[in-house]
Image (spheres, rainbow, N blue to C red):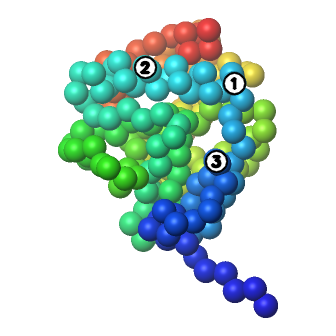
Amino acid sequence: MVISRVLTVDDLAEAALPEHWELVNGEIVALSPSSGKSARIGGRIYALFLRHGEEPGLGFAYPAEAGFLLFDDRQTLRSPDAAFVVRDRLPTEPEGFVPVAPDLAVEVLSPSDRMADTLAKIAMYLAAGVVMVLLVDPSAQTILVFRPDESVTMLSVDDWLDGGDILPGLRVPVSEIFR
């Protein structure tokens, strides 16, 4: 008989982990690395968050390596491909994992990603209080914008991405993200 236990975030410091991972309800989930194209797009979006959000002092921009504790009552640590947290919710930058869910999370699809898994992750972000989730599809050159209690909006290369109340200075052509 194999007895397994739920891992806590505190256990992670001593655990032997795969190179790319997340913690979902106390279980380690191994992740595939991003494709080069997806990683570049995620980096480009992170740079937009830096320029339009962090530099003016609105909050903190995070790249794909950052881990966010999504819930107080569940051992769940997720890493979006880019994220932003407004300063009012995170007055100082933490030393460890980010102790709050981001206000804006980005998932960039890679060829190895399964859509069902990505949509489940987006649903988890929204349940954790994320205000806006961007699902970026490099092959279709579209961005799906998810918000709690709203329909999904699809942006194409002819549209503009707007940061809304989270990043009021962000307004960029979608085509620029896929250039």
Give the mark nearer the N terminus: 2 vs 1: 1
Does residue 20 show up? yes
Q: Residues within 10 Å of mark 1 (few under 14, many from 20)?
A: few
Q: Residue 65 versus residue 101: which sits nearer the camera?
A: 65
Q: Are marks 2 and 1 in contact (CB under 8 Å)?
A: no
Q: Give the residue type that dot 2 points to.
A: Leu
Marker disc for residue 48: 2
Query: Which residue corresponds to the image point at 65% horizontal and 22% vertical from the top-left?
Result: 142
Is disc 3 placed on a helix, strand or loop?
loop
Rendering coords of residue 167 (x, y %): 34, 27
Q: Amino acid at mark 1?
A: Gly
90 to 175, vertically: above or below: below
Sooner in the amino-acid sequence: mark 3 or mark 1 = 3
- Give, as a three-letter code, the residue at label 3: His
Quadrant for residue 59, please give it.
Answer: top left
Which SS class for mark 1? helix
Q: Which residue is mark 1?
A: 36
Which label sits on residue 113?
none
Examine the image and state in which quarter residue 4 appears: bottom right
- Report the residue at 78% width, 33% height from top: 111
- Give 130 or 66, whichever is nearer the viewer: 66
> Residue 48 at what x, y percent from top left?
43, 20
Q: CA distance from mark 3 to mark 1?
A: 15 Å
Residue name at image x 53 percent, y 46 percent: 79
Asked if the residues shown at circle 3 and circle 1 are in contact, with their CB atoms under 8 angstroms apart, the answer is: no
Indicate whether 75 appears above or below 69.
below
Q: Label 3 belongs to which residue? A: 20
